Image (cartoon, rainbow, N blue to C red):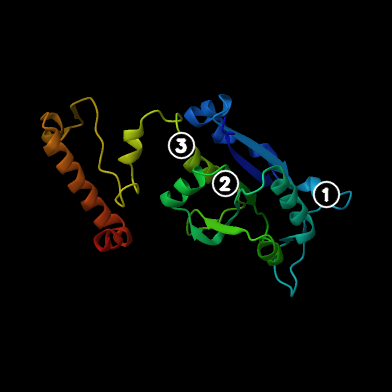
Amino acid sequence: MKPAWTARILTILPEIFPGPLGASLIGKALEQGVWTLDVMDIRDFAKDKHRSVDDTPAGGGPGMVMRADVIGPALDTAAAKMPDTPMVYLSPRGAPLTQEKAHALSAGPGVTLLCGRFEGLDQRVLEARDIEEISIGDFVLAGGEVAACALVEACVRLLPDVLGDAESLVSESFEQGLLEYPQYTRPREWEGRKIPDILLSGDHKKIAEWRHAQAEETTRERRPDLWDRQKKS
C-alpha cells in the first residue's frame, strides 16, 4: 500500500498546526489518513538552555537571523525520516507557488516545509541543503506558517478522494491557464439581479461556450500576465 502523502513542517510555533488544515474536507482527509502531518519544533535543536534559534545578522542591520547550526540539524532529522522528499523554504524571495507546482508536489511522497521567522534564514543552509524557496505572493508575513498552510492545502486538495469531484478540479482557476468563470445558484433573482438566462437554458454546449468566454474575459481584465501566456500557448 502506498504511504500517505506527508507534510512535514519545521517551525518555532508548532501550536499553530493543524490550524485550518484540521478543518473541513482537508481535516477530514487528515483524520482518515489520506495524508499525514508531522510538525517539528525547531527549538528542540537549539544548543543553549534558552532554546535560542537566532542571532544578530553578520555585517549589522535590524532584526535577527535564524542560525545555520540549529536549522541544519533540524532539516537533517526531517530528511532522515523521509528521504527523497523535496525541502521547501517559504520565503518572499522564492518562485511563486503555482497550480502546476502544487500538482507536482502532490504527485510525490510529500514535502518538508521550513517556516522562517525574524529577518530570515542563514543563506548557508539554503545552499548546503539544496532547499527550494517558494513564495505565496508579493507581500511579507511575520513568518512562514500561514504560507505553509496555504501550500499544504493546495497540494492536499489534489489528492485522490479528498474533494470527491474530479470535474470540479478541472474547471477551477489556473487549471486551464484561465481564471474561473462566475458561479451562480438559487434564488433565481436576488436584489434585482438575475442568473444569466443562458445558464438556465439547458443547452450544455452553449453554457460551456459562455463559461469559457467569461473565463477569458475575466482573465484578460484581471490577470493580463496569464492572458498573455494563454495566447502564446
Query: Going from the N terminus, do you reach mark 3 or mark 1 first?
Result: 1
Judging by the rendered image, the residue that carries numbered circle 1 is 51
Could you tell me residue 18's position as x and y percent? Answer: 61, 34
Judging by the rendered image, the residue that carries numbered circle 3 is 157
Q: How many residues crowd mark 2 within 10 Å: few (<14), some (14–19), many (20+)? A: many
Q: What residue sits 66% from the left and 47% below the top?
A: 83
Q: Toward which corner of the image does residue 128 lie, by quadrant?
A: bottom right
Task: Say which quadrant the C terminus sits in.
Answer: bottom left
Q: How many residues crowd mark 3 within 10 Å: few (<14), some (14–19), many (20+)? A: some
Q: Is residue 67 visible?
A: no
Front tag of 3 and 1: 3
Q: What residue sits 68% from the left and 57% below the top?
A: 118
Front tag of 2 and 1: 2
Q: Looking at the picture, which amino acid does disc 1 mark?
A: Arg
Front tag of 3 and 2: 3
Q: How many residues crowd mark 1 within 10 Å: few (<14), some (14–19), many (20+)? A: few
Q: Looking at the picture, which amino acid does disc 2 mark?
A: Ala
Judging by the rendered image, the residue that carries numbered circle 2 is 148
Q: Nearer the viewer, residue 164 or 122?
A: 164
